[in-house]
Amino acid sequence: MTSIHVLGAGTPTPTPNRFGSAFVVETESDQIMLDCGPAATHKLVKSGLWPTNINHLFFTHHHFDHDIDYPCFLLCRWDQSTGKEDILKVYGPKLTEQITRGILDKEEGLFAHDWIARVNHPLSQRIHVNRGGTLPRKPPHVQAKDVGPGKVHSGKDWEVTAASAEHVQPYLDSLAYRFETPNGSIVFTGDTQPCESVETLAHEADMLLCMCWDEQSVMDESGEAGGQCGTEGAAKMAQSAGVKKLVLVHIGPHLSQDEVKTRSVNELSKIYEGEIVFADEMMSLKM
């Protein structure tokens, strides 16, 4: 069985129930994180998962609502480790390598002071040994790689392919990802407007997790339709791609209201013939 754990299903606007983007794909062999938005590490643990079991992390792009918890996740995963875990492999568009160095680099990393203290202080060394680690304690080591469209990585029972997404270019590059697992295919659009590259990536996928900011009419009236999907855009892209299930994520505060969601499902169903799910944080989807 493959599970998709929804850690973050919101936007840059914090609400009591949604904030930012983060997901975990759990196969029989691996737990793979996708994006690392606000409080993702805490939400991960609330979902019954654990940072040291995450060996791969993929970023769609580097807006803060998709990567602000990255320093926390890196340091927490390293701090809780015994030193015997697999090296964390991180993939994403341009800036992924730079941001990783900016967090951990011994000379200039913004959080180097933290791990240097924990490596060297006797109290931190004792805690590390009590957790099952050995001395000398190793500094954090992460394999980060900037990637673009095409095949990105293969695991024991999964592989990932990326395609360009259309969001806020030329300021940030954005990627959508398709995961192939023994139980089916899953596509994460990241933040994007409806576009051919993402639609092609999602062709006949079993599940499409698509950003959906708001009702299309509201977005068209406010001028916020460019660079992102609304209800109509998400439904049309899912229908054209022939996906079996459409899961709406990156949902804004207005669309999160129950009466608006009910109205939107009726509108979406006129365009998209498959199953529609409005994702909630801490939701797990099975395949």
Image (cartoon, rainbow, N blue to C red):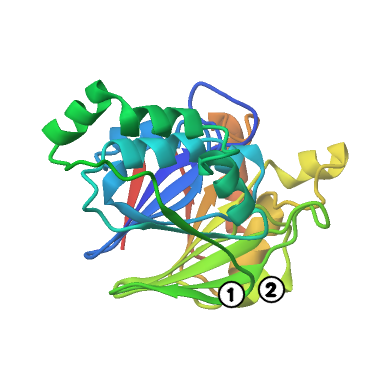
Where's residue 197, x and y in %? 69, 73
The amino acid beneath tag 2 is Ser
- State the residue in front, 272 or 32: 32
Where's residue 53, x and y in %? 27, 50
Q: In whole angstroms, how far apart are the C-alphas of marks 1 and 2?
A: 6 Å
- State the residue in front, 56 or 194: 56
What residue is disc 1 on?
Answer: 201
Q: Which mark is residue 141?
A: none
Q: Are marks 1 and 2 in contact (CB under 8 Å)?
A: yes
Place residue 213 in its image quadrant.
top right
Secondary structure at numbered mark 2: helix
Tell me the residue at 73%/51% (across/down). Answer: 228
Q: Residues within 10 Å of mark 1 (few under 14, many from 20)?
A: many
Tell me the residue at 63%/71% (across/down). Answer: 163
Q: Is residue 192 above or below residue 214?
A: below
Secondary structure at numbered mark 1: helix
Q: Is residue 124 above or below residue 88?
A: above
The amino acid beneath tag 1 is Leu
Q: Which mark is residue 197?
A: 2
Q: Residues within 10 Å of mark 2 (few under 14, many from 20)?
A: some
Tell me the residue at 31%/63% (across/down). Answer: 287
Where's residue 9, x and y in %? 51, 40
Q: Is residue 200 above or below residue 88?
A: below
Place residue 158 in its image quadrant.
bottom left
Q: Is residue 271 in sight in this rendering?
A: no
- Report the side of 34 relative to 261 (left or right): left
- Report the side of 173 relative to 265 (left or right): right
Where's residue 10, x and y in %? 56, 37
Q: Is residue 193 in sight in this rendering?
A: yes
Tell me the residue at 61%/34% (across/down). Answer: 260
